[in-house]
Amino acid sequence: MKGLYAICDTKLLEARKVEPIAYARAILAVHPAAFQLRAKDMPAREILALLRVLGPLCRQARVPLVANDRADLAALAGCEIVHIGQEDLPYELVHRIAPQLDVGISTHTPDQLMRALASKPRYVAFGPIFETASKVNPDPVVGLAGLRQAVEMAHAAGIPLVAIGGITLATAAEVAKVADGCAVIADLFPVGATLDEVVERARAFQEIFAGSSGTAAAGATT
């Protein structure tokens, strides 16, 4: 998994007055490494309906569709991956509920990362690398030094690592020297941007990682 891990946050899209499907079509045009639906405040029935529409779009673009948190909805919708955090269902239970799903795991400390890697997930996420406004109570910033340590651990286990937290176009090049990919929410769709501009920003993130000659290639998978 190398490149842009695009996150479709329904709360952000509501503030921008853009429908998730329109946003998905824009992002999928550049074929990111993955596309995640993050719908923290949406009822389960609506999340499932949205995932079922996104699934064919992602498959057509050959981009893995990731459901955030909800393994049950991911399985029902036919998603490829479910992403879980430290406060969600543990990997073992997710795997028991939906063995057909690949799993990505968010981690924020070396200890959390070590435990996650032992489960052999599809990928691990690590951060926040920089300060972020996407979470109400974010974990402590780990910085680029923490990211380098985490990538060494992940690649030693043969698992790709996606950097998370506060990553922008201005900082993506430094991140790309180290990590396999980067998850982005806010900087894909700044206030006042059009969907055409979103496409260009997504393409710019992809190109940064495609042109990187850092350590990421050693452990990257697709």
Image: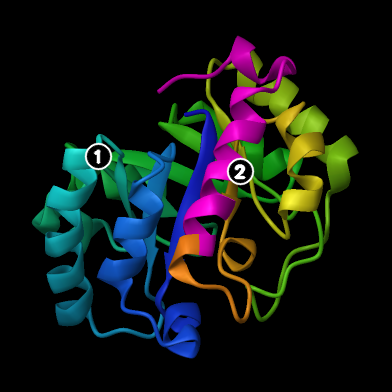
The disc placed on residue 168 is none
Quadrant showing the C terminus:
top left
**Residue 170 visible in image:** yes
Alpha-carbon span between mark 2 and mark 1? 18 Å
Number of numbered discs:
2
Q: Is residue 159 left or right of residue 48?
A: right
Q: Is residue 129 visible?
A: no
- Residue at the extreme top: 218
**Bounds of the magenta span?**
197-222
Give the structural element (helix, strand or loop) at label 1: helix
Q: Position of residue 109 (x, y in %)?
A: 74, 46
From what the image shows, is residue 12 above or below residue 142? below
190 is within the stretch colored magenta: no
Along the line of sight, which residue is nearer the eye, 31 or 88?
31
Q: Residue at the spot x=54%, y=26% of the render?
A: 160
Of the pair 216 and 140, the residue shown nearer to us: 216
Pinpoint residue 91: horizontal percent, then vertical percent. 39, 45
Question: x%, y% of residue 43?
Answer: 25, 85
Badge 1 crowding class, 10 Å Cα cut-off, few under 14, some 14 to 19, many 20 or more, is some
Hey, what amino acid is under mark 2?
Ala
* Residue designated by label 1: 61
Residue 152, above or below 63: above
Relative to 121, residue 59 above or below: below
Q: Nearer the viewer, residue 152 or 118?
A: 152
Q: What residue sits right under mark 2 in the picture?
A: 204
